[in-house]
Image (cartoon, rainbow, N blue to C red):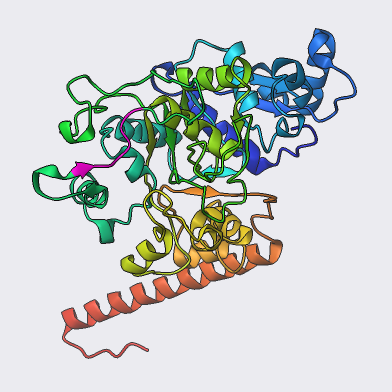
Amino acid sequence: MTGMKYTSDMLRTMRSVISELALGPDGEYEAFLLVQIKDETTNIFEDPAAYNETLRKVVPKEFWNMTVLWWTGLWGKQYPKLPEGSRNVHASQWLPTQYFLKKYPAFDYYWNWEMDVRYTGHHYELLESLTSWSRKQPRKGLWERNARFYVPKYHGDYSTDFKDYIQDRYRSGSGEKKEDLTIWGPLPPAEQGTTYLDDLPPLESPTPSKDNFTWGVGEEADLITLLPMFSPDTTHYSLRDSHFNYPSSLLPSEPPRRATIITFYRFSHRLLSTMEQENVHSLGHHMSSEQWSQSMCLHHGFNAVHAPHSLYMERQWPAKALNFIFNNGDSERVIKAFKDMPALVDVVLPNRSRNTVIQAALGYKIDGIGGVTWEAKHGTYCLPPMLLHQIKDMEDPAIATADETHELEAAIKEEQFQEEKANAESDALKAAKAGGASVHAT
């Protein structure tokens, strides 16, 4: 956005995304920067010269040819059916992405990478592993698995134990009459005249009980998220009722919807196109950003996958306790006590904690960790591949002060002296043994 300070940390992150993805193997990815223009006094989008002048003012030169500018003033004409209060960046984060889709429609898939996310591994390996894993997931029980945090030590193997654990929770009856109650195909709103036939189950499997976990395997996911897709209707989620232009209902579950915290997703072209069509061509359906894409997949029967990954805790929690805390609701409303959940995981650790981890890994001295003296004594501070969010306001401290440099030089000299002394004593001892004398090192 305009006014953003491009710190060396931010530039370093953007360059790593570009070099590891856009300049990576086979040219599979391209990287773009979407920048919000907050000064709406002049419509630069109708004046190419003004657009280019603004671009050069607000974005570093190295990113000029990969930047797309946007502003909320564009949405009034493009989305006249959306309530005015819903067109801001917080309620409608995907309008800029849909705008980008219309300008660059040739891509099959679109990753949204937030500027305050840091990954300590290789970006290409991350995206490819998420994509490959999602492609292997069967549709049967998928929405129900999507809703939960997967705790390996509690649930066991994901593809067998966890899958069976979920299926058992959604069966009713007994014996041959046992019925599978998992979501199967589209789950559209209960409004008159609404029929979605986008992704119907196979003819040979009209119900989930007839499917042997085959539908969906090998399919590309329309949506990939990194946290669960839960039903927000009876949770403490602050935006649970943030849906627009749907008929009023006394049922909190209408319209059917799912939500995911943190908007680091992969979209398919058809999902973004469907979101656009619902905004423009229907009644102007819309929801808050963290519900909109998931709910469109739910309504239209698209393939949405929550890809579990390592979540780093502030302390060592027993697996049973983790499952109780994170999956403590009923059915798909598993994050019942939603307001209590964020304090436990890395994605919402105190900002200082996340920044400390990154800065120490970069060789900075902060909070007693990292820096040249610390590394001389303990070794280089290394991290496993992990996502950290949110990384904000991270300034670059000096790598080493003059005092630290002198301290390091003194430590190195002392280490060299001790090493030379030990070598001399060892040589003297060997010489004494060869001559048959008794020598005591001092």
Q: Main secondary structure of the magenta part?
A: loop
317 lies left or right of 252: left
- Residue 383 x, y percent position in the rendering: 44, 53
- Residue 415 x, y percent position in the rendering: 47, 71
Observer-nearest residue: 386 or 403? 386
- Residue 390 x, y percent position in the rendering: 59, 49
- Quadrant of the snapshot with the N terminus: top right
The structure residue drawn at horizontal position 44% and vertical position 69%, both measured from the top left corner, is 315
**Residue 30 visible in rendering:** no
49 lies left or right of 191: right
Q: Residue furthest left?
A: 176
Picture quadrant where residue 404 is located: bottom right
Picture quadrant where residue 117 is located: top right
**Residue 176 visible in rendering:** yes
Count of residue discs = 0
317 lies left or right of 437: right
Residue 348 within the segment the image draws in magenta: no
Residue 183 within the segment the image draws in magenta: yes
What is the magenta range? 179-185
- Residue 62 x, y percent position in the rendering: 67, 23
Observer-nearest residue: 325 or 176? 176
Picture quadrant where residue 90 is located: top right
Observer-nearest residue: 392 or 276? 276
